[in-house]
Image (cartoon, grey):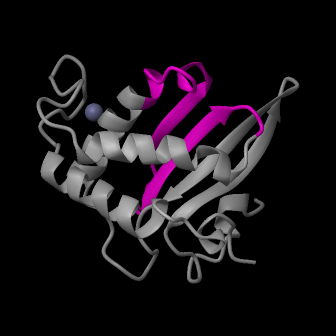
Amino acid sequence: MEKITSFTIDHIRLIPGVYVSRKDQVDGSCITTFDLRMTSPNDEPVMNTAEVHAIEHLGATFLRNHPVFGSRIIYFGPMGCRTGFYLLLAGDYESSDIVNLMIEMYEFIRDYEGEIPGSSPRDCGNYLDMNLPMAKWLARKYLDEVLYDITEERLVYPQ
Ligand SMILES: [Zn+2]
């Protein structure tokens, strides 16, 4: 079988950032997949599942309620390697197009207080596996080190 595109990225040189992972044409419409890379692959500790899970619930809730992008959200969820998330948007976008959206989303997570949406046995398959303080810490780190004053090298995959 052929190696899929996301396995051809040089993960050794990849740094935390906001990247376009791929664009797919589906029945004449473009779907853009973003790589929201939060930790440096094979270089720093990966995120634990409980904070990844909390970011997933909060991020998905924020995105699907967003007044501008809400109707364009196809999917938001974690990478299996736990170094980041994928966001799928209906439309043809560049990474710089969603930086402000990601700042809004990660500020929402950083500042979130209270019960995480969907964290109940009826709504989620593993509702106790949530770590809000670490999710907030990771959101702050991504904002401070990546999203605020983002540089070109964090918007385009290494060649
Ligand atoms: Zn869940």
Q: Where the N terminus falls, by quadrant?
A: bottom right
- Is residue 113 rendered to the left or right of residue 14? left
What residue span does the magenta drawing correspond to? 63-92
Q: Where the C terminus falls, by quadrant?
A: bottom right
Q: Residue at x 48, y 46 (%)?
A: 102
- Is residue 29 rendered to the left or right of residue 62? right
Front residue (pair 99, 45): 99
List x then y, in percent, for residue 18: 57, 58
Looking at the rendered structure, the number of numbered marks drawn on it comes to 0
- Is residue 146 rendered to the left or right of residue 22? left
Front residue (pair 104, 20): 104
Do we see residue 4 in this rendering? no
Q: Residue at x 73, y 42 (%)?
A: 93
Front residue (pair 8, 134): 134
Q: Residue at x 64, y 64 (%)?
A: 155
Residue 132 highlighted magenta (yes or no): no
- Is residue 58 rendered to the left or right of residue 132? right
**Location of residue 112 with respect to 122 vertically, above or below:** below
Q: Residue at x 19, y 16 (%)?
A: 122
List x then y, in percent, for residue 54: 25, 42
Front residue (pair 8, 58): 58
The quarter holding residue 148 reads bottom left
Q: On the rendering, which quadrant does ligand 1 occupy?
A: top left
**Location of residue 38 with respect to 26 vertically, above or below:** below
List x then y, in percent, for residue 110: 26, 48
Which residue ends up furthest to the front in the rendered image? 149
Do we see residue 63 in this rendering? yes
